[in-house]
Amino acid sequence: MFRRRAATAIAAAVAALTGALTFAAAPSAGAATGCAVTYRITNQWTGGFGADVTVTNLGDTINGWTLTWTFSTGQQVTQAWNAAVTQTGANVTAKNVDYNRTIPGNGSANFGFNGSWSSANPVPASFALNGVTCTGGVTSSPSASPTRFPSPSPSPSPSPSPSATPSASPSATPSTTPTPGKITVWLAGDSTVANSSGDPIVGWGRELGQYLTANATVANNAVGGRSIQTWLYESAVTSSTNSSGECVLSSTAYAARWQSMLDASTGMKAGDYLFIQFGINDGSPTCPRHVGSARYRELLTAMVRAAKQRGANPVLVTPVAALTCSGSTATPNRGYLTETFDVGSATGTPVIDLHKLSYTLYNSLRFCPYSGDYTSGPVGAFFANDHTHFEAYGARQIAGLVAGAVRDQRLGLAAYLR
């Protein structure tokens, strides 16, 4: 359960919120080298910020690149995507990943990161690409006014009344319109995320939009009953297994939902977010839903890379917990947690541990012990007709956990929270 907090964006460096700084270098005599860098602060909040960096190669094709710069006021990189970013003191190094190692002449590579700051957040004074300094003119936008981003409504009381229908929803409108432009928050998952899997079941994805400003639109492509593989390939996943015990595919063509999300005109675009939550149905021992540990990592990594290649920001979500009790304590009960964290670590992708957050919430609400009756009382108001699926009230609180984690982990999407 998270508490309401008001996060105030600081006026310092606000001019960079919608602007970009560009650094360029002409090739030196006799050498086909040169570079241009655009560094853009996409959003900023108290103590944190998100940045987008585009490096353009003005020389011959580069096969493997390293971009370096120095922060002047103690900023620290906390998360990165589309590049491996490390920092020693004030010096930052961003190296290519496998899928963007080559930059042709006049071509570009893009990556992004989240960072922290305290006293000020000026843009770096200069950059170097593979040791070649990028210098040149600076372009910035007019100064903008600071904005306030109030938190979503708090989680429910620890002891909701069993006799009344609970009602909790975020504030109807933010106190001010946030500076960031419009984005789409894409969701991929199972029935616990989907808009609905039949009355009265509601997934947390349907309720997430209540915690976001009007500048963020939720596109919920979660589907009930799906493992990560059946979500990606649908009916192409057969009931036969191969020598590795994995379900055989009759075709490698993606399902229409994922094809549409990958399409340049209809799908994910730079600045969007992709939240991925699987792991509930994947543990089935039989095909077509069965997905083994290695295959799960493989498919999750492919989805992450596809989002990053399009400039979108993937966020991995561990599977939301079912309600299982050991006496008076709600206990962990989902698999694929290690696999999800492993992919997050390997790809530099943030992970929201919704599994832990959810069973911790159940304990704060004192759901255990329970009689197995899902028709009355606090448990009946939260869950649908089993210990896994939610009614609208429960889905709203789980969505609130996701929104709270976005704020607590200082993800760039925090700028779009109510």
Image (cartoon, helix red, strand yellow):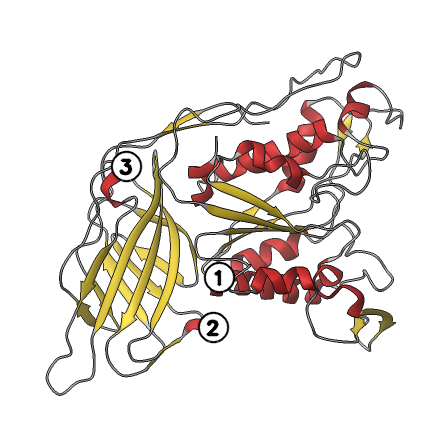
279 versus 394 height, above or below: below
Secondary structure at badge 2 equals helix
In which image quadrant can residue 284 be found?
Answer: bottom right
Give the label on residue 308, or none.
1
Point 22% across, 46% down: residue: 141
Point 21% across, 44% down: residue: 73
Q: Residues within 10 Å of mark 1 (few under 14, many from 20)?
A: many
| Amino acid type at mark 1 | Lys
Q: Which residue is mark 2?
A: 99
Q: N-terminal of the two: label 3 or label 1? A: 3
Q: Residues within 10 Å of mark 2 (few under 14, many from 20)?
A: few
Query: Would residue 22 appear left or right of 191 to someone viewing this image?
Result: left
Query: Would residue 377 appear left or right of 341 to someone viewing this image?
Result: right
Q: Nearer the viewer, residue 325 or 301?
A: 301
| Amino acid type at mark 3 | Ser
Q: Position of residue 57 (x, y in %)?
A: 27, 74
Between circles 3 and 1, the one closer to the viewer is: 1
Badge 3 vs badge 1, beta-carbon distance below 8 Å = no
Q: Which residue is mark 3?
A: 118
